[in-house]
Amino acid sequence: MIEHGRYVAQLGDCIACHTAPKGPAMAGGLELKTPMGTIYSTNITPDPRTGIGKYTYQQFDRAMRKGVAADGHNLYPAMPYPSYAKMSDDDMRALYAYLTQGLAPVDRPNKPAEMRWPFSMRWGLSLWNWAFVKDEPFKPDPARDAVWNRGAYLVQGLGHCGSCHTPRGIAFQEKAMDDAGASGKHYLAGETVEGWRALSLRNLWTVEDTVQLLKTGQNHFATVSGNMAEVIHNSTQHFTDSDLIAIATYLKSLPAGKDDLPMPAVPKSPAMAKAPENLFSSRGGLGYAQFCVDCHRQDGGGVKNVFPSLAGNPTVASDNPATLLHITLTGWKTAETAAHPRIYTMPGFTRLSDQEVAEILGFVRSSWGNHAPPITASQVGKMRGEVDPKTADSSTFETPRLADMLRAANSAQLVRGMRLHLETKALLPNNVGNSLNCTSCHLNAGTVADGSPFVGISAFFPSYAPRAGRVITLEDRINGCFLRSMNGKPLPVDSADMKAMVAYFDWMKKETKPQDKVAGRGVGKVDMAIKPNLDNGKKVYTQQCAVCHGDNGQGLKNTDGSFVYPPLWGDESFNIGAGMARTYTAAAFVKRNMPVGFHEKFPLGQGGLSDQEAVDVAEYFTHQPRPDFAGKVKDWPKDKKPADARY
């Protein structure tokens, strides 16, 4: 019975509300904000003084079905007892056994609620219960099969899905507790909760796709966000397959609501999706190209099992943009599940202005067939005020805004120069001899601090280069990358494309003088006294790098053969003459920029490895097989070569 109760507790996701951040499990203390004030969840461990250790089964059953505690006071319906009232007696007894006999008691006093008057007067809850609570167990529908009825029981009762996904009435009651009767059309039709839009669950995707989402946190169409990530982690990933199928079957059976978007039967294929025509000609498109493309791609398709697709994504396409705004300002992370144990993150973009966020999201909501209404700067500002996003980013680096290129007299040339960095292989196939783009090393087209940005660079040329043993021009430096990092051929210095690349650098120079120090320039340094551990380097690569760059450094490809993320060794990668082929140069880059989606650092969630880990993994991948460099015999003709040079 205790093990049965443990599973019932997972079905009801008790741990989510009854565990405070970093607090003991089930001991309460979680802050729950409501429009009427703040409630704190209670201790439901079997501690006799502060928990439910002295509850009889009858008292426990009354609390669960009627919202009345053992001492007779009314519970606030933030505890979803209107849903739990549908529980069977067997499940209720099993849950009681688990909570009172299967948990260790924790002595942790409950915090009193902080509700505004008149909501602080609990006697009024008796009237609320009389009006809105039906304390009757679930009754199966004889016209439906056992699978449907099991799904309805779990969704309406233990799962209490309606607590977030059903619209609320004037008394903050759920407008419907099930799909029956005239009010049934409101059930699970979507609601906004704590700044998140809990989407309509009616007529969801195929049963298989819904099961996949509940089991893993993602499917072909969407990736969960906000509180739902915790629901997946704590609750639904642990459900039996039969229960997941039952839930998905029930949800699929509910008729679509009047405002619901049509549910696609299949996801958009890469052949169906492509880069929007205004990607490089609109402010929103250029903002997307700068801040979003690395993870969500030009075609909005995302990266399978890593970053979600935006094409046909219900959060993106919803008429109510609350969740989209919330994610953009505060960040996002995947649900941690057995299927996807690694958590991927998106940082909050609170550094962008309200207008910039509105432009980018407006572009996203109008691309790839999403056809959603635009977003205004005032909507962004309102959400910013509600969620009060914080940032730990104290960098003084001034991130250039690619959208501002459109204001320049030579905007067409600047955009071409930027694209030559972003899409080098595609636009200059005769000069690129491998599968890299400039942005492979110069992140976000050279606009990321410590990601070898282009900001101010042209102010420092011409300059002496020890590798060349002479003063070189910016054009010489660019062609050095074509010869080494691109393993290709130089670009004619008088060509329109070279002039466009130089113009792009000059645009980023701003007011920089040759003697200035630019914050975030280069990739930083790593102490060369750190000795690499090759075995640990291979381990770090497997854990942190292989998902994007392949288990054998081969990179990650689209179905059409094009690269999503570049190979780190082999014939399609940089040659031994590249700076990234040197252990400590690569380690400095990795430490500050890889992996992406690792935490909340603006703008890619980049970096996060220790110095030792960065040196270890850099030693591992830099010394893998890669092309030779014929020009190596001319390098460092006068100056001492670096200690980690490959030749």
Image: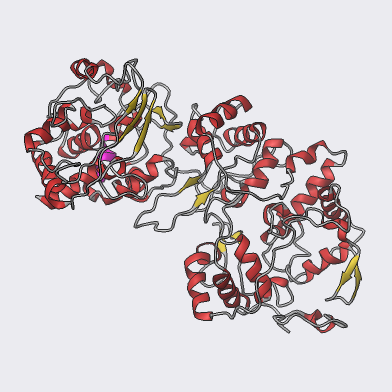
Range covered by the magenta-colored residues: 244-250
Residue 566 visible, this orientation: no
- Name the dominant secondary structure of the magenta segment: helix
Residue 432 left/right relative to 23 = right
Residue 381 in the image: above or below residue 495: above
| Residue at 41% over, 39% down | 265
| Residue at 38% over, 41% down | 228
Residue 202 left/right relative to 155 = right
Residue 56 in the image: above or below residue 346: above
Residue 635 visible, this orientation: yes
In magenta segment, residue 116: no
Where residue 439 sits, quadrant-wise, is bottom right
Instruction: Name the one closer to the observer, 490 or 568.
Output: 568
Horizontal and vertical percent for residue 51?
Answer: 19, 42
In magenta segment, residue 247: yes
Horizontal and vertical percent for residue 403?
Answer: 73, 40
Residue 459 in the image: above or below residue 533: above
Residue 153 in the image: above or below residue 214: above
Horizontal and vertical percent for residue 632?
Answer: 79, 81
